[in-house]
Image (spheres, rainbow, N blue to C red):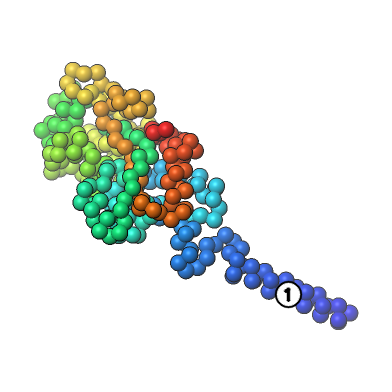
Amino acid sequence: MIGWEWRRVARWAVLAAFFLLLVTNRGFFARPPEGAAATEFVLQLKGSDTMVNLGQAWAERFMKLHPDAFIAVTGGGSGTGIAAFINGTADIAMSSRPMKAKEKELARVRGRPPVEIIAGLDGLAVVVHPQNPVDALSLEEIKAIFTGAVTNWREVGGEDLPIILMSRETASGTYVYFREQVLDNEEFAPHTLLLTSSHHVIEGVAASRGAIGYVGLGYLSDRVKAVAVAAEPGAEPVPPTEEAVKSGRYPVVRPLFLYAVENPKALAREFLQWTISPEGQAAVADVGYVPVR
C-alpha cells in the first residue's frame, strides 16, 4: 500500500515538473517571450484623442484574430503621438492632422522615415447645449465666436446669454485643425477654456446652456446638439452626417492618419494593412467615423 502511494506521488511530481516546464519555457498562457523578441508581439499606438476609441476598437478586433498579439492604445493628442513615434516609444502614431514638414524631417534624422496612411474621415462637429435655440451657424460666425468678436448668443440669433468657449488643448490635432481651417490661423479668444479631451468638451457643453465646443463625429451624443454649418453666409447649412462628410457637402472634413516607419515589423505591417481592409473599415463606421473604403 505504501509503495502504491509513493508511486502515485512520484507520478504527480513528474506531471507537475512537465507543466512547469511548459509555462516557463513555452509561453503556456500566450505570454510573449522575454527580452527583445517580446516586442515582436506588442504594438504601441499613441496619439489623437479623437482616434483613441477607434484605436481601441481596432485593437480589440485585431487581437481576437491574433491571440498572441498585444496592442496598447493611449491618447494624449496628435502632437504627443507624433513625438512618441519620432523618438521610438510608439510603433504607430494616430493623428487627426498631417505631420508637419519639420516633424517628418526630424523622424528621418532619427532613422524613422514615416509612411502616412489615411484610415478614415471625420467631420468636425460644432456642438452646443441641447436647449440652445441656435441650430445652424456659418463658418464666418463660428470664427467670430471662437476669436471673441461675438460674445453673446443674441448676436447670432440666439438668447441674450454670454457665450462660453470650450476647446481642445494645444497638443491636440483637433485644436490645430480647427485653428488653421476654421479660424484661418487666428488666435482663440483669451477666455477660451482649453480641455484635455473631447470627452471633457462634451461634458462641459452639456453642463452649460451658453457653451459651445467642437469634437469629432465619434464623440457626438444626445447630451449635446451638433449645429448645421454653412460654408459661407447665405449658403445652405449642412449637418455633420456620414453622407455629408463622404460627399464633401459638410464644410469641415479632415482625414484621420496613421504613421509608421517605412519598413515596420511584421505585426505592425499586418495591423496597418488590416485597418484599411473591409473588417478594419467596419470598425471605423461602428465608432462613428467615415470609412475611406
Residue shown at the point (48%, 55%) measured from the top left: 70
- Quarter placement of the N terminus: bottom right
Q: How many marks?
A: 1
Up the image or down, 62 lies above or below 14; here it is above
Question: Does any portion of residue 50 appear in the rendered image?
Answer: no
The percent coordinates of residue 190 (x first, y second) are 13, 43
Q: Residue lying farthest front?
A: 263
Residue shown at the point (49%, 38%) measured from the top left: 279
Left-right relation of 225 to 170: right
Foreground of the two, 178 or 149: 178
Foreground of the two, 114 or 158: 114
- For disc 1, the neighbor class at 10 Å (few under 14, some 14 to 19, many from 20) is few
Q: Regarding mark 1 in the picture, which secondary structure is present there?
A: helix
The percent coordinates of residue 180 (x first, y second) are 18, 38
Up the image or down, 17 lies above or below 177; here it is below
The percent coordinates of residue 164 (x first, y second) are 20, 37
Residue shown at the point (25%, 36%) measured from the top left: 213
The percent coordinates of residue 288 (x first, y second) are 40, 34
Q: Residue lying farthest bottom?
A: 2
Question: Does any portion of residue 186 appear in the rendered image?
Answer: yes
Q: Amino acid at mark 1?
A: Val
Up the image or down, 108 lies above or below 9; here it is above
In the picture of the structure, the residue carrying the numbered disc 1 is: 14
Residue shown at the point (29%, 32%) measured from the top left: 253
Quarter assignment of residue 246: top left
Left-right relation of 117 to 164: right
Q: Residue lying farthest left?
A: 149
